[in-house]
Image: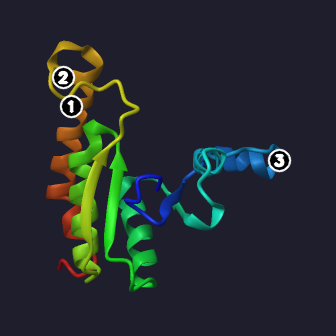
Amino acid sequence: MESGRADRIIIVEESMGAFAVLESRGASIVSNSEQAFGSLVALGIPRDNIVLLQGNARSTLDEAYAVGKYLAGNREADTLILVSSPAHMRRAQMIFRSTLRVADKAVVIGCQPSTYSSFNGVKWWRRREDIQTVLAEYIKIASFKLIETHKLPGSE
């Protein structure tokens, strides 16, 4: 936002799974999404420029659906800057493009890998964690291409 690249930041509320049980028992749990919101405010982003979407998202696909629904209700929004970890960027872009295409929403999707990652995309084969991340991403890309794209509404 400081650089003028976006006038809104969209965060999709993630699934809290078992934490919901703790909340039902009176525990106060702050979700990662709420922490991200608070951090953005602490960094000087006006609250009105941050959109926290309800979604109970358990996956990038869930996030893409929630963002697509939000964009459908905001016809003036035509550009999305997708921020994710460098290793996940390709798959996240695939998922958002497929989901928004099916939703019949003309949106330009730009990608900005997060700089807050230790993943080394240039020499990923040199570190065990990076090798595991790359292999997991390829499996997830295959799953998305072979299974999930066939489940998208309008893809029958």
| Scheme of image coloration | rainbow
In-image side of 78 versus 32 (left or right): left
Identify the residue at image location x=18%, y=22%.
124
Q: Viewer-proximal residue, 95 or 19?
A: 95
Q: Amino acid at mark 3?
A: Arg
Q: Earlier in the sequence, mark 3 or mark 1?
A: 3
Q: Viewer-proximal residue, 58 or 79?
A: 79
Residue for badge 1: 134
What is the C-alpha distance between the residues marked 3 and 1? 39 Å
- Measuring from the top left, give residue 43's x and y in whole percent: 60, 45
- Measuring from the top left, give residue 31's x and y in whole percent: 64, 47
Q: Amino acid at mark 1?
A: Val
Q: Viewer-proximal residue, 40 or 15?
A: 40
In what element is the residue under mark 1? helix
Q: Viewer-proximal residue, 33 or 109?
A: 109
Give the class, few, some or many, for how many residues have Cα within 10 Å of label 1's Cα (few <14, many ≥20). Answer: some
Identify the residue at image location x=19%, y=48%.
141
Identify the residue at image location x=28%, y=63%.
96
Contact check, label 1 and label 2, Cβ < 8 Å? yes
Q: Amino acid at mark 2?
A: Trp
Contact check, label 3 and label 1, Cβ < 8 Å? no
What is the C-alpha distance between the residues marked 1 and 2? 8 Å
Looking at the image, can residue 152 be seen? Answer: no
Q: Nearer the viewer, mark 1 or mark 2?
A: 2
Residue for badge 3: 25
Looking at the image, can residue 142 be seen? Answer: yes
Quarter of the rendering occupied by the C terminus? bottom left
